[in-house]
Image: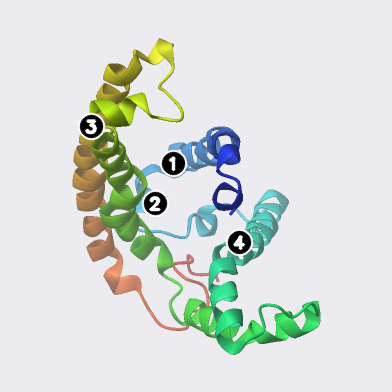
Amino acid sequence: MHAMWKPQKFKLIYLMATVYVLTLTLPSASAVYWAFGDMLLKHANAISLLPRTAFRNIAVILMLIHQFITFGFACTPLYFVWEKFIGMHDTKSLCKRALARLPVVIPIWFLAIIFPFFGPINSTVGSLLVTFTVYIIPALAHMKTFASAPARENAVERPPSFLGGWTGLYCVNIFVVAWVLIVGFGLGGWASMLNFIHQIDTFGLFTKCYQCPPHKT
């Protein structure tokens, strides 16, 4: 949202998001994959594979906090649309706006309880759709926008010199498109679809503990 209101801050926000992924998301994900390996092919709920210790409980609590915060951020545009639709967007009372958002929150929570197997669906959608919206389409749009010489001359920001100017930037864009198309969309789509098919028998509505191992008696 900051990038929409103040586009000049987009670079800093994007850098902060990249640092977050490289320092928190990737190391923790790599550690879990390293520890459990192929077991994750049949268990989308990775936390269910962790031993029942205090560290596992802390991880669950932190994940719940993360989900609550992310849910609020992700639903903010939908909140604004709904508030404008019912005429509550300009209301200064936070309590009234919170109550007005309940018709948006409750159905989403209810669907999340019904369909706990969101992980395989999310990976499939990510590999087949997000690869295009996040990487391929922006790179192609950038190359098309600055394809002509006048467009490059009138560009507000020029590519950095260490990148090789416009030629180097176009090479980077072409590499991103080709790499994501082959690895992300191709191999990722194939793997996620295959994983989805293998786990489809474990899906169930209102599952109490999705893919949790049975209790030892």
Q: Position of residue 75 (x, y in %)?
A: 56, 69
Nearest to N terminus: mark 4 or mark 3: 4
Determine which residue is flagged by label 1: 33
Determine which residue is flagged by label 4: 73
Are dots 3 and 2 in contact, CB under 8 Å?
Answer: no
Give the SS element for disc 1. Answer: helix
The crowding category of the residue bearing disc 2, from other C-alpha atoms within 10 Å (few below 14, some 14 to 19, many at least 20), is some
Rendered-image quadrant of the C terminus: bottom right
Q: Position of residue 203 (x, y in %)?
A: 35, 74
Left or right placement of residue 193 versus residue 59 in this view: left
Q: Is residue 44 visible?
A: yes
User: Residue at the location (39% across, 51% down)?
Assistant: 40
- Amino acid type at circle 1 is Tyr
User: Residue at the location (59% across, 67% down)?
Assistant: 76
Rendered-image quadrant of the N terminus: bottom right
Are dots 1 and 3 in contact, CB under 8 Å?
Answer: no
Give the SS element for disc 4. Answer: helix
- Amino acid type at circle 4 is Phe
Nearest to N terminus: mark 2 or mark 4: 2
Q: Position of residue 194 (x, y in %)?
A: 21, 57
Above or below 141: residue 167: above
Are dots 4 and 3 in contact, CB under 8 Å?
Answer: no
Nearest to N terminus: mark 2 or mark 1: 1
Nearest to N terminus: mark 1 or mark 3: 1
Relative to the observer, which residue lies in front, 100 or 83?
83
Are dots 2 and 1 in contact, CB under 8 Å?
Answer: yes
Relative to the observer, which residue lies in front, 147 or 171?
147
Determine which residue is flagged by label 3: 147
Determine which residue is flagged by label 2: 40
